[in-house]
Image: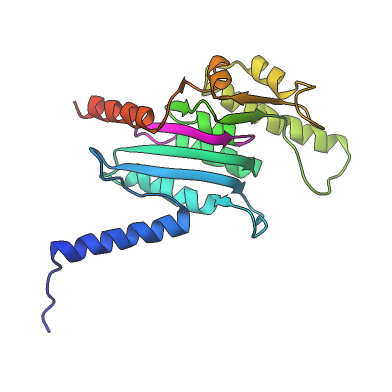
Amino acid sequence: MQHQPKNEQETEQEYEEQQRQDMLETGSIMKTRGRYAIHCLTIIGQVEGHTMAPSNQKTTKYEHIIPQVVSIQEDPQVKAMLVILNTVGGDVEAGLALAELIRGVSKPTASLVLGGGHSIGIPLAVCADRSFIVPTATMTVHPVRHSGMMLGVPQTMSYFERMQKRITGFVSENSSITARRFTQLMMKTGEMVLDVGTVLDGQQAVKEGLIDQLGGLQDALSYLYSRIEEQEG
């Protein structure tokens, strides 16, 4: 039996079905249908690393994000990437690894913080070419913390110090805030109950140089459009 080529309507239906599946599985839209094909990458809830989070928590699984970022880099149809963030933080090593991976994408990238970009969400917010935050969003800057049992030995403290330096260095290299100022915000007392650190709203995050500018979805997309048009001449 001779195979009949698919018509345009069948192709369109398959595309929409694939988009629905991608939304259900990863919460991301692989290619927008605007002026240019832009991959929308969402990072919500807790960044899940090597250990699974409880089933009642919203999570972003790093094993879902890694192949998406590689696909963005390799797909010639995708012109840019928009990272949408509303995260409480999560696994430090997984979050920092994803931030490094996104930073390595050669195509134009922008991040947009909605709701929250806390803890390890900060490196994920600043790793893009340009970062945006809405005025009502907040970002919590605090030291590396550990849940569960750990050994109270000098080697443990040394490990935490080295991890903190990696995060501080990454944030200062990819934003306008200095490592010294970031550390000051991180170690501030009297603002957070039973903890040290600082909570910044959108305007404060921009003022501190942590985020590039206040703005919403249209601002982030306009930035990406302009970068794409610059590259394509």
Residue 22 position within the rendered picture, expressed as x and y whole percent measured from the top left: 40, 57
Left or right: residue 45 compared with residue 192:
left
| Residue at image location 75% in from the left, 37% down from the top | 145
Magenta part of the chain: 104-120
Q: Quadrant of the C terminus?
A: top left
Provide residue 27's location: percent of width, then percent of height.
45, 52
Relative side of 95 to 160, left or right = left
The residue positioned 49% from the left and 28% from the top of the image is: 133
How many labels were placed on the picture?
Answer: 0
- In this rendering, the answer to whether 57 lies above or below 179 is below
Residue 151, image x, y percentages: 86, 44
Say which of 134 and 28 sits in front.
Answer: 134
The quadrant holding residue 136 is top right
Nearer to me, 229 or 204: 204
Q: Residue at x 27, y 59 (%)?
A: 15
The verdict on residue 119 being magenta is: yes
**How is this picture coloured?**
rainbow
Which quadrant does the N terminus fall into?
A: bottom left
Tell me: 105 left or right of 115.
Answer: left
Residue at figure coordinates x 37%, y 59% from the top left: 20
Where is residue 77 drawn, in percent x and y? Answer: 25, 45
Residue 185, image quadrant: top right
| Residue 188 belongs to magenta span | no
